[in-house]
Amino acid sequence: MTYTVDYGTGPAVLMLHGIGGSSDSFAPQVAGLGDSLRVIAWDAPGYARSEDPSRELDLDDYADAAAELIREKCSDAGAHVLGMSWGGVIATRLALRHPELVRSLVLGASTVGSGADADSAATMRSRIIDLGRSGPQDFAVRRAPRLLSPNASDDLVERATGIMTDAVRLPGYGYAAESMAATDHTDDLEKIDVPTLVMCGDVDTVTGTPASQELAGGIPGAVYVTLRGAGHLANQEQPDAFNAWTESFVQITERLRIHSTVTH
């Protein structure tokens, strides 16, 4: 069973959390966007309240699971897909494998995949060992603060730590980390044919703006936005700006789609 939050009305947006998160990571989006958008957020297989998968999953499997969720929740209408970090890598693969289900992409603090760089891939795989040795709580206490800017409040750091503690466990985290380490979308980005918005915090030291700019530069027609004062968890640290860009992009995409249908 895959646990989901389904809240609000309007155009549907499937939200895919990062490798250390869960649907709880999108609480600011549920609260801020539920009056204008339908927010659907999952706990990825093997995370938080979702069941552990019966076998190892690769990135295609995660993308296919997201596609199945869209079909279940939205039928043939599809959904806008918002992915943070690892969730953005899944969203990219989803757009490549199931473009008919993706109305637009919003990629936050994301990359082409850790497989684009050998050191990044090795670091990603080392986290599996770290989590196995230290356990979720110690892992989260050490890792979560790095995902926020130096100016993040103690309350936000505590909340991010709690979300990660409750979300991550083996084997699910291990499958997710391996899927990132094995992925490089660089040569496939030009095939993406849906409206795309790429956002990154200007003090994100995990992804970093160059990696997000590379992602945006490879997708035809992508819009790139830097969020001032945000670290890696930009949707949590600067939710007002993140939500404003997301809502505007989704609504504009919907209007353009309707206009295109009418004129043709």
Image: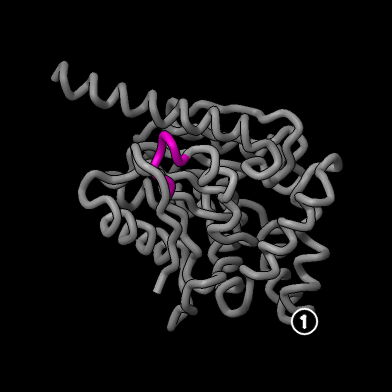
Q: Is residue 47 visible to us here?
A: yes
> In this picture, is 4 found above or below 224?
below
Q: Residue at x 36, y 48 (%)?
A: 96
Q: Which residues are magenta?
A: 34-39
Q: Is residue 137 magenta?
A: no
Estimate the x, y position of residue 111 in percent, counting from the top left.
59, 46
Which of the 4 quarters of the picture holds residue 63? bottom left
Residue at the far left in the pictured view: 264
Kindly identify which residue carries mark 1: 133
Q: Is residue 213 visible?
A: no
Q: Nearer the viewer, residue 202 or 258?
A: 258
Hey, which quadrant is residue 134 in on the image? Answer: bottom right
The picture places residue 26, in percent across and down from the top left corner, at 56, 50
- Label 1 amino acid? Arg
User: Is 221 rendered above or below residue 128?
Assistant: above
Q: Residue at the spot x=45%, y=78% of the render?
A: 53
**Residue in the foreground of this view, choosing between 26 and 118:** 26
Q: Give the left or right position of residue 107, taking residue 210 as reference.
A: left
Residue ID at (51%, 46%):
30
